[in-house]
Image (tube, rainbow, N blue to C red):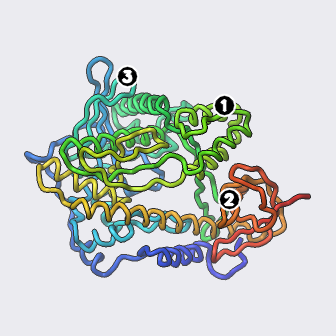
Amino acid sequence: MSTHQGSDTGRLRSIARRAMLERGLLPEFSAAVTNETNAIVDGPYEPNAAVRDLRHLLWASIDNDDSRDLDQLSVCRPAVDGAVQILVAVADVDGIVHRASAIDGHAEANTTSVYTAAQMFPMLPEKLSTDLTSLGQGQDRLAIVIEMLVGEDGVVTKSDVYRAVVCNRAKLAYNAVAAWIDGTASEPRGITAVAGLDEQLRTQDRVAQAMRALRHQHGALSLETIETRAVFDGDVLSDLRPDQPNRAKQLIENLMIAANGATARYLEAKGLPSLRRVLHSPERWQRIVDLAAESGERLPSEANALALDEFLASRRRSDPAGFADLSLSVVKLLGRGRYAVQRPGETVEGHFGLAVHDYTHSTAPNRRFPDLVTQRLLKAAIAGQPMPYSTEQLQALARHCTEQEDNAAKVERQVRKSAAALLLESRIGQRFDGMVTGASGKGTWVRISHPLVEGRIVNGFEGLDVGDRVRVKLVRTDVEHGFIDFVRDRA
């Protein structure tokens, strides 16, 4: 328990707000945004000549247990020769959040929702993101639908994009659905309440796994990093608990990757530019080669995604307990993704980690501004209207969204560090086994496992590099700044 006055949640919220302001992010909505939001009324949302009626389909959402900002639904229909038609519905946020409005201005300023240990700072007001622009259960909502024909081998052979009215039949949660798919738990109540939904989800899971296998054949990386979630006992921080990957998350991830690819190809076919998400070849490939050599395996001297994934798959089999640590090392060495404008007929680099070339962000417009920009481009393409953004505006947005995404990630990381320092305040002098997660002129960083936190090695870091195992002793914590200092323990 914290020895300082004030609740843990209150301290962390204060730290989060300060960190956002320091990074050029807006923690609060302006009066103009609030006034606009209060004036917005719900639907009704009725189909017309330009908007199809797909409310009869067995749409369902799968998200975190406590998520209310539901961006997408999915459903499938059988096709010929073993193929399956996959439909992904994305909330039509642009239908309510108009360009150049005060709400849009706030969203463009932050470009993303910011998820911190004590508080979530939504990109859009909650009246919208958790209600009017959320695909909530039992609610008729406008959506952009990405329709894909997928063969048994996971190849998307045909796709289309159009507008529709949809209705979410079941709000499902990752952990419950994953346990049911794995056969370790009974069918969730949300599935049993909708006749035919169980078969729907099993088919979607099969298709998603085929898509995943195909991407891995092309070199998609089998990474398994572990994120932590703050656990509170009342207002007291009690743990940072790992958020494990599972089969239901894979289902949604693979359908969304496919939908984002179909979106990018649709815009190009219509002669419009797109805001692509790209990840260059690894910035520190040689260090990845060295990590493989330390495990007795070999990688080529030039970056090769397929060879890297084969190495990762081998390590997962031979050292499952240490695979998350290896994944984290590789992620750090890959570098961060960015946004880039792709003009029709031009080529931009694809996404190295996902092994896809055509990739944009389009499936989370309640949470990410690039997705809202893409949605506006799609609606213009569908309606045959002029492009809503000039190429120059898109290029400026690509730079801005990349910068603000990086700032948001730094805020989230800073608050996680403050939460970790809070947990470790009473453990000064204790020793831990850890793994080096960062090594540069800015410092050397180590992650320990119990609790799962990261800190800086302030003494004895010479010669250490990413992926090295090391024994450390905790010497200082600073909750306000999120500092956790270790020294190398050579005892």
Q: Residue at x 33, y 79 (%)?
A: 30
Which label's residue is closer to the chain start, 2 or 1? 1
Which label's residue is closer to the chain start, 2 or 3? 3
Disc 1 crowd rating (10 Å Cα; few below 14, some 14-19, many 20+) is: few
**Residues at marks 3 and 1, CA–CA distance in whole angstroms:** 27 Å
Which quadrant would residue 367 be assigned to in this image?
Answer: bottom left
The residue singled out by tag 2 in the image is 439
Q: Residue at x 56, y 39 (%)?
A: 302
Viewer-proximal residue among 15 and 67: 15
Which quadrant would residue 201 be assigned to in this image?
Answer: top left
Residue 442 visible to an observer of this rendering: yes
Q: Is residue 78 above or below residue 93?
A: above
**Residues at marks 2 and 3, CA–CA distance in whole angstroms:** 44 Å
- The tag on residue 233 is none
The residue singled out by tag 3 in the image is 152
Is label 2 or label 3 in front? 2
Viewer-proximal residue among 205 and 152: 152
The residue singled out by tag 1 in the image is 317
Residue 130 visible to an observer of this rendering: no
Q: Residue at x 34, y 52 (%)?
A: 71
Q: Is residue 323 above or below residue 124?
A: above
Q: Can you name the residue that lies furthest to the right here? A: 491
